């Protein structure tokens, strides 16, 4: 099979790699330079909508910083939706962005405004070229607040409002995967683990019950009782883990503390229900003087690597396949019965860094792969 960029059918084939790279890099930098931290995505959503409408894409404001399009392409054929989020993590002196011939630098370039640039440019090219050469219908689903907890996500309410999205045969959630397919995703529980003791003077610790010591014993116990556990789905290995990520306590330098709180993060594998995952965590963190309060629980995403459309995508780009050892909105799509996988140009190692960046070559490869997939 020809590699992306060879003589394949598609709406981008009139562009050389250099021309396509320039177009994608320019668009990516344009998006990076518009402030879009979580809860402040309005300007970027409005800008993206304006670009799409001006280019003839049947896009509309779906409310709450969400932009969706009607299908582009032939009257029949599977509907493939490109999913992306507008928001970024907080800036680290990395906006405005910058670029050179090889790389776009700046806030959100890897996660995931470079991918949004690819989605927009593919949609614009498809709208300009009509259905010529396309065998699949193309849609976009762009939304905000993905970088926050799932309770604040704009996507799940959007799927309730825009019922036409449920007709999608496949969603490609364009999270940073370095142009590989990452199937499924882990569930994600956050919880507060409290330890209760009795305060007292540090000169007479026998009159007190040190909550820090209780916390230390509990955390060591948890580490021994919850080693990483591997689960295999469709030949992909997901690793279930439990970690203590924060701890806070203490009253004064001469006071034995009576309360300590730790933050526990549990990543659980596909195939485990949210209720079963919570029950396991409660059992692990249920010692004397301890209590666990679940603060959020984002369900895992189904593993759709065997879906025929996913297999076609893999073949079109000669793509590697891996498990998604994290949580992504794939879980929100598969929860309503839509097949979805992660596929995007950003490199996970660059996401959320001060020098966040994405290579022009990766942008081009992603766009070529999508173009071939939609036209094969």
Image (tube, rainbow, N blue to C red):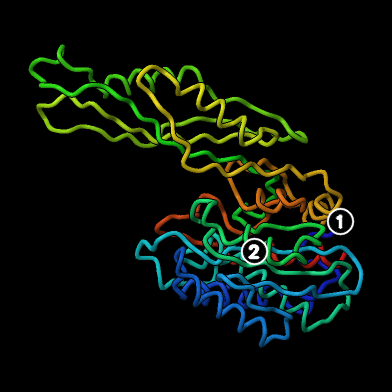
Judged left or right of residue 339, residue 147 is left
Quadrant, the N terminus: bottom right
Which of the 4 image quarters holds residue 94? bottom left
- Residue at mark 2: 158
From this viewpoint, which residue is outermost toward the bottom? 54
- Mark 2 or 1: in front is 2
- Residue at mark 1: 1
Q: Residue at x 92, y 69 (%)?
A: 76
Q: Dot 2: few (<14), some (14–19), or many (≥20) neighbours within 10 Å?
A: many
Where does residue 229 sit, x and y in percent of width and height?
A: 60, 25
**Residue 363: numbered disc:** none
Q: Residue at x 13, y 26 (%)?
A: 255
- Mark 2 or mark 1, earlier in chain: 1
Position of residue 303 relative to residue 16, above or below, is above
Quadrant, the C terminus: bottom right
| SS label for mark 1 | loop
């Amino acid at each position: 099979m020809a590699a992306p960029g060879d003589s394949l059918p598609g709406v981008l084939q009139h562009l050389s790699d250099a021309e396509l790279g320039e177009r994608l890099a320019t668009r990516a930098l344009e998006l990076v330079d518009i402030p879009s931290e979580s809860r402040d995505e309005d300007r970027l959503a409005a800008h993206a909508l304006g670009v799409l409408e001006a280019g003839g894409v049947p896009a509309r404001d779906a409310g709450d910083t969400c932009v969706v399009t009607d299908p582009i392409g032939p009257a029949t054929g599977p509907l493939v939706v490109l999913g992306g989020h507008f928001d970024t993590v907080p800036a680290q002196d990395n906006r405005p962005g910058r670029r050179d011939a090889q790389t776009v630098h700046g806030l959100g370039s890897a996660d995931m405004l470079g991918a949004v640039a690819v989605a927009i440019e593919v949609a614009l090219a498809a709208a300009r070229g009509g259905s010529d050469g396309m065998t699949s219908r193309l849609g976009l689903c762009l939304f905000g607040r993905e970088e926050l907890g799932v309770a604040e996500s704009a996507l799940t309410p959007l799927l309730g409002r825009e019922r036409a999205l449920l007709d999608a045969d496949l969603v490609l959630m364009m999270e940073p995967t370095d142009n590989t397919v990452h199937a499924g995703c882990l569930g994600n529980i956050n919880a507060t683990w409290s330890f209760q003791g009795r305060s007292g003077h540090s000169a007479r610790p026998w009159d007190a019950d040190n909550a820090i010591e209780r916390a230390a014993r509990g955390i060591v116990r948890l580490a021994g009782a919850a080693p990483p556990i591997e689960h295999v789905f469709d030949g992909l290995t997901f690793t279930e883990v439990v970690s203590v990520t924060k701890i806070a306590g203490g009253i004064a330098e001469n006071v034995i503390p009576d309360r300590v709180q730790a933050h526990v993060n549990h990543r659980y594998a596909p195939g485990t229900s949210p209720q079963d995952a919570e029950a396991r965590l409660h059992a692990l963190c249920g010692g004397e003087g301890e209590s666990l309060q679940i603060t959020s629980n984002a369900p895992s995403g189904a593993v759709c690597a065997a879906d025929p459309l996913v297999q076609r995508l893999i073949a079109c780009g000669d793509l590697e396949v891996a498990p998604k050892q994290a949580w992504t909105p794939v879980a929100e799509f598969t929860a309503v019965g839509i097949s979805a996988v992660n596929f995007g140009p950003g490199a996970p190692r660059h996401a959320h860094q001060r020098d966040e960046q994405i290579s022009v070559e990766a942008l081009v490869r992603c766009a070529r792969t999508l173009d071939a997939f939609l036209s094969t």
